[in-house]
Image (tube, helix red, strand yellow):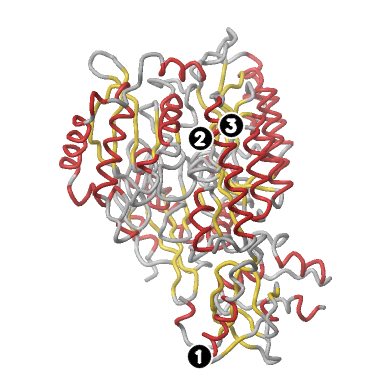
Amino acid sequence: MASKAKGPKAVTANRLSDGVVVYLTPDDRWAETPDQADWAEHPQAQQALLERAQAFAGTTVVAPYLFAVQPQADGTPRPSHMKEVMRAKGPSVRPDLGKQAEWGKQAERGKQADWGKQAGSGRPAELADPGPGEER
Amino acid sequence: MYRYDEFDQAIVNDRVEQFREQVNRRLSGELSEDQFKPLRLMNGVYLQLHAYMLRIAIPYGTLSATQMRKLAHVARVYDKGYGHFTTRQNIQFNWPALKDIPDLLAELAEVEMHAIQTSGNCIRNVTADQYAGVAADEVEDPRVYAEIIRQWSTLHPEFSFLPRKFKVAVTGCREDRAAVAVHDVGLRMTRDEDGEPGFEVLVGGGQGRTPVIAKTIRAFLPKRHLLSYLEAVLRVYNQLGRRDNAFKARIKILVNSVGADEFARMVEREWRAMPDQELDLPDGELERIQAYFAPPTYADLPDDPPAYAAWRRHDPGFARWVQANVARHKQPGYAIVNVSLKPHGGAPGDATAEEMEAVAELADRFALGEIRVTHEQNLTLPDVRQEDLYQLWQELKHQGLATANVGLISDIIACPGLDYCSLANARSIPVAQRIQERFQDLDRQHDIGELKVKISGCINACGHHHVGHIGILGVDKKGEEFYQLTIGGSADENASLGEIVGKGFAYDEVVDAVETLVDAYLENRQTGEAFLETYRRLGAEPFREKLYAAD
């Protein structure tokens, strides 16, 4: 499990009512993009992060868990593992669906992440697109 | 087709309202996720990578045009415009909101559909040969028995908490299109010396991390004993199947550990101890169910009418489609049409709402309103007049549904893989798409001939890689997608498990590797020999040599 690996982590879950992938923010909201997520380096702080998230498991989210992130130069986290990149974006075979579809509409560059190339070049499969957090 | 009686409809309606209450209680926080999870799973609601996923049962793969239209409606209103037909003849929707699922299920109930027993440790949706009732060499229509099993197993109190899930498949033919040898129980209709129809009972087949070909525990079971004997099989399994380790809980592990002969004796003892075999089918009941599946009134038509023969001669595209996608019907003048859901570049088994509606309309116009779903993730129109085939083909072509590749290298089974599934280690769909792209020349595909490629994104083997002529298994190797190749698997009447050819391949190498295996076959094949036959004649060595020649 990602939670056993060392390194910085953030918390993700699915929104209870509709299943949308969400991330716990520093001010205890649930954002739809990982760049807004709170993250922690030390296991104790990570545990505290998870406990904060679990307080929302009653009526807000389903199955919160820690996952590995890579903090960027500006301090925003990005998922490290391919599975979490997939959750953050949407299916690689359907760039018209999931969160990536929204970015496509927002960013007129029309540049969809090239999943094949990412996978071929190995890990980490980073978000090739800056994401909506920087767009807004 | 079977129509719900008042009991069926009441069960399904009650369940919808029960689940509506459960969802409300979950959303209000009255139920915790730990309390709710088993309830939602009993109603086919999973939590996947991006969202909830709803798996809807299509019993023995039979759908009416009306039901197909409802699925299209569900795709459009409750999902993102498409659905995914699975290897168990179910359909999955990838994006429904939990709060809307009770309404969705209420709509399904209107057309006699539900999601009961599509998850959990119970007897799952019973599958059958997609050519049921129309295959030329059939002993009897297997759907009659699949329906009887469905009724017996629905909400069966004793078998709602089995050690693990339990899958049953039924075929009425010697030729096996239902993959009965890789099911927990496979039933193959056969005849005894007196010509009486009954079942060969196979037990303990399965895929996953421990692939096993089922063993025959009874060569002939008279039809009337079907349920009592199945009850005995399930009782033995329910009592002795392991509950301490989910990976060792399937019946195949039990059958392997005690041995098939001993398992058969245990079942026989259990069966004979039942009071008067009380579950034997009462007189009249079999006939009652059979009446639902009575063959339609076929017109008296000549086989191979002149216009059909002429279009095959004059239109090579049509001829190629007929060759790959059309199968022989038991009734002269009729044909079985396979509608490929493997267009090049698509996701295997996916269909848009528009495609579902188009198939429903064509089924109404050309195929007596009936559609089948195949375990190879295609659709079948079982009753088409040969004289209508050319027009049907043109209309399918117009809808992008006439890909002439059934049974060929681009007719790939693929699980949803890492694109959708939270269990997956690697992607399946884009690998299938890249293989389709590489072999997109249909002439080349037809020259290669029958070749079943099956791709799973993890060891759970939902993509049936163990029984692919070429099997591809996605694994996670230090965070990268990696693919292991097997060859020589088969899910038909001569079922076999594929053997690993050697070290695996990276995402960017796997299509080349598949092509190399195909080249090895082409170099070694004898006239008229299919890929699997060449492998069975020569073994894996020539394939290995070619694949790892550079090493």
- The picture quadrant where one finds residue B493 is top left
Per the image, label 3 sits on a secondary structure element best described as: strand
Q: Position of residue B309 (x, y in %)?
A: 61, 19
Foreground mark, 1 or 3, reads 1
Q: Is residue B273 left or right of residue B59?
A: left
x 52%, y 92%: residue: A42
Q: Nearer the viewer, residue B103 or B230?
A: B103
Crowding near the residue tagged with mark 1, few <14, some 14–19, many ≥20 C-alpha atoms within 10 Å:
few
Per the image, label 1 sits on a secondary structure element best described as: helix
Foreground mark, 2 or 1, reads 1
Which disc number belongs to residue B59?
A: 2
- The picture quadrant where one finds residue B29 is bottom right
Relative to B171, say whether B83 is above or below.
below
Q: Residue furthest top?
A: B300
CA gap between label 2 and label 3 equals 8 Å
Relative to B246, say whether B206 is above or below.
above
| Residue denoted by label 3 | B63
| Residue denoted by label 1 | A44
